[in-house]
Amino acid sequence: MTTAVVICPGRGTYNKTELGYLARHHDDKGALLAGFDRLRVEAGQETLTALDGAARYSVAHHTRGDNASALIYACTLADFLSIRPDIEIVAITGNSMGWYSALACGGALSPDDGFGLVNTMGTLMQERLIGGQLVYPHMGEDWRADPARKEALLALVAEIDAREGHRLALSIDLGGMLVFGGDEAGLAAFAAAVEPVDGRFPMRLANHAAFHTGLQAPVAEQARQRLSAAMFGQPRLPLIDGRGAIWWPGATRIDALWDYTLGHQVVAPYDFTRAVRTAALEFAPDLFIVPGPGTTLGGAVAQSLILCKWKGMDCKAAFHERQQAEPLLVAMGMEAQRNLATGEGD
């Protein structure tokens, strides 16, 4: 039997090309999606059916935290439920908001409770929208490790954060990218200090708050007041969090899982690179499966595998050679790869 680690995507993955994703791929999951729509109506929010079925994609509307988070969670969970039964899922992790999806996919939360968690956090983030995020690479185009460059960028961030009236910190260690969160002064200072790369970076992320930094302490506190530990349970599958720590079935302290999810996970850096390394080295799966929506997380997964020299890979060319010979990364948001996970069309 093929073994797999599932890696749930976070914010920024439901974009223009993903519009209609639920309708295209999951018309067989009407009951699940109707339940999510009911929860949205009860909260006075637009339904996922309406958002996914909109005539056109709107950056201002679809990337709002209260809309994007719910859409991404629904797509991820529905894709997870579509993975063919002859694939043995040995562990689950995710990037940033993807941790919440991982909790539901792994059984620590019911689908509805997972949706409630995601929708609550997305709404709180949008209501407060404290600070912002930007992305900058520390790897070159060849995806070779460059520790000195990474250290220099982190030192620059620490120096900016020490300035009066500036807040800036690492938000996500994302494979070959670093995501930084901060206030306007901190983000502007970083953007002014670094060289532009590929005409894209430093890239400011639309409708993103300063996730995974101390600026989100008010959001974490409000979430802890609204969301009870009673909604959590023992996971059915091992879960790898944003520190690279593993939560094992039958050995998880529920109060600690709640505390991490609505504490450290909100206000401290999220080490996605380490989570993928743990997944590879501890579980040695045949495949890494990234559910939809979107395809942007695949590069970060590949870069994270390169950074831990998985299967001897040390650069982009080595990864592509391995991927072409025998796929080890499957992105369900890519039509050409989707059937490898679902068996659709076989």
Image: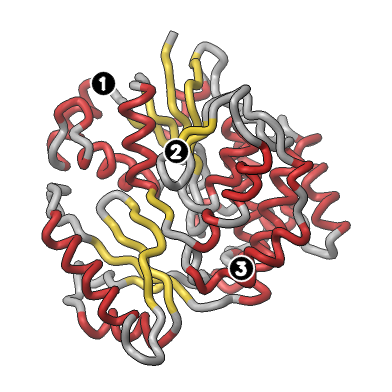
Q: Give the alpha-carbon distance from disc 2 to disc 3, as whole Å.
A: 30 Å
Q: Residue at x 63, y 35 (%)?
A: 253
Q: Are marks 2 and 3 in contact (CB under 8 Å)?
A: no
Please state which of residues 217 and 336 is positioned toward the viewer in this rendering.
Answer: 217
Is 180 rendered above or below residue 272?
A: below
Q: Position of residue 213 (x, y in %)?
A: 47, 67
Q: Give the alpha-carbon distance from disc 2 to disc 1, as whole Å.
A: 29 Å
Label 1 secondary element: loop
Please state which of residues 116 and 251 is positioned toward the viewer in this rendering.
Answer: 251
Q: Position of residue 172 (x, y in %)?
A: 39, 58
- Of the numbered discs 2 and 1, the one sitting upstream in the chain is 2
Mark 2 vs mark 3, foreground winner is 2
Label 2 environment density (alpha carbons within 10 Å; few <14, some 14–19, many ≥20): few
- Of the numbered discs 2 and 3, the one sitting upstream in the chain is 3
Query: Is 13 left, or right, of 74 in this rendering?
Result: left
| Amino acid type shown at disc 1 | Glu
Residue under circle 2?
Answer: 245
Please state which of residues 41 and 267 is positioned toward the viewer in this rendering.
Answer: 267
Q: Residue at x 21, y 82 (%)?
A: 193
Q: Give the alpha-carbon distance from disc 3 to disc 1, as whole Å.
A: 38 Å
Is 336 rendered above or below residue 22?
A: above
Quarter residue 204 falls in:
bottom left
Residue with the most extreme bottom position: 164
Residue under circle 1?
Answer: 326
- Of the numbered discs 3 and 1, the one sitting upstream in the chain is 3
Mark linked to residue 64: 3
Please state which of residues 150 and 290 is positioned toward the viewer in this rendering.
Answer: 150
